[in-house]
Amino acid sequence: MQKIRLSNIILFLLLASASFAQKKEVVNSYIATYKELAIAEMKRTGVPAAITLAQGIHESGAGNSKLVLESNNHFGIKCKSNWSGESVKHDDDARGECFRKYPASADSYKDHSDFLKNGQRYAFLFELEQDDYAGWANGLKRAGYATNPKYPQVLIKLIEDYGLQQYTFIAMGKIPDEEPGSAIASVDNGPTEKIIVANEHEKIPTVMPVEKNKADSYPAGEFIINETKVTFIRKGTSFLSIAKQYDIDLSKIFEFNEIARAEIADSDQLVYLQRKRKTGSNEFHWVQSGETLHDIAQQQAIRLESLRELNWLKKEDKPAIGEKLSLKSKSLSMPRLTVKENYSLVPVTKNQGHN
């Protein structure tokens, strides 16, 4: 009986995992299909692309709702008295309500932008920063766009889970567009740092606050950084000796410090004796020459994954020198990036009703 129950649990977990993967694939497909529309509409009207895409995903079931299939209506906009186009009947707050029908999805996206831009009760939203997605999400609920009390949280989670803020940044010119015609800055003098910019004339700032090198000022033995126990060791120190000294499993040393297993330290470094925090004690950190994200995570006693999430960074991303990284709360913008490689100037290739 116990074996049967265990096999049922395993089957359930496998099915749940497959369902989640399938849902993620459907959402990613929707984003790939409609991201350019969202960017174009943001440039035209100012409605943030991240908000548009999150609303589209949520309200259209990632393009698979009956309303979308029957009418290309991605945002559940009802007819109302000023609508003179085609319509369909759909059950929402009441049975058989009138919803707008569009010739194509692009018309739905355009009408959604105009609906917000021209609606008096949404006017205050356009006074917010375009990359303040949390402000927009909460503002839509406050303006009466949706009746679901958790509507802002739904949008915010979609934006953060699927990295939709990058499309707002593209529309704002903060990161390169993925369409042919945008360019990457170029150099020809061998391996160097490539500056990823919105156009070839934009430069990365180099002036920044200078932080004191603390390597020679750490106290001996155990001390605290960001409420986390840590010690400072010199190059050549045995990790096993540290584990024994502080009565910690050796594997935990590597796990807490997010480093590969090794016998001895290959450099002077901080070694955390417990798991680092999800946020830092400082508000920000300015990237300095030669620093990696791991270096910063160690200096600030913050988990590397959390540092990336707070700043919209992927595993391979490297912030440019002088960029300001957020350590306490989600950054409203992605830092400029650099990568190491040879390169020359090249183009970048590329359901509910509302009143």
Image (spheres, rainbow, N blue to C red):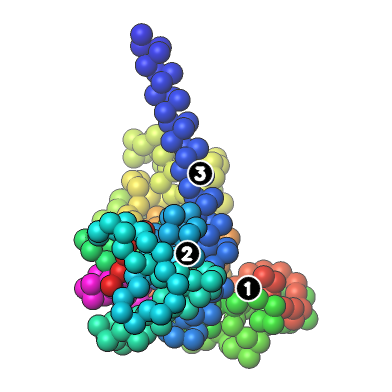
Viewer-nearest of discs 1 and 2: 2
Residue 331 shows in the view: no
**Above or below — where is 29 with respect to 132?**
above
Q: Which mark is residue 71?
A: 2
Stretch of the chain drawn in magenta: 130-145
- From what the image shows, is residue 304 above or below residue 191? above
What SS does tag 2 mark?
Answer: helix
Give the x, y percent position of residue 115.
37, 80
At a point 47% along the width and 40% down the height, the residue shown is: 19
Say if the magenta span includes residue 14: no
Residue 261, quarter of the rendered image: top right
Which structural element holds mark 1?
Answer: loop
Is any atom of residue 143 visible in this view?
A: yes
Residue 178 is tagged as 1
How far apart marks 1 and 2 lie (CA) works out to 29 Å
Which label lies toward us, 2 or 3?
2
Q: Which residue has dot 3 on it?
A: 21
Dot 3: element = helix
Residue 90 pos. (x, y %) = 36, 59
Q: Earlier in the sequence, mark 2 or mark 3?
A: 3
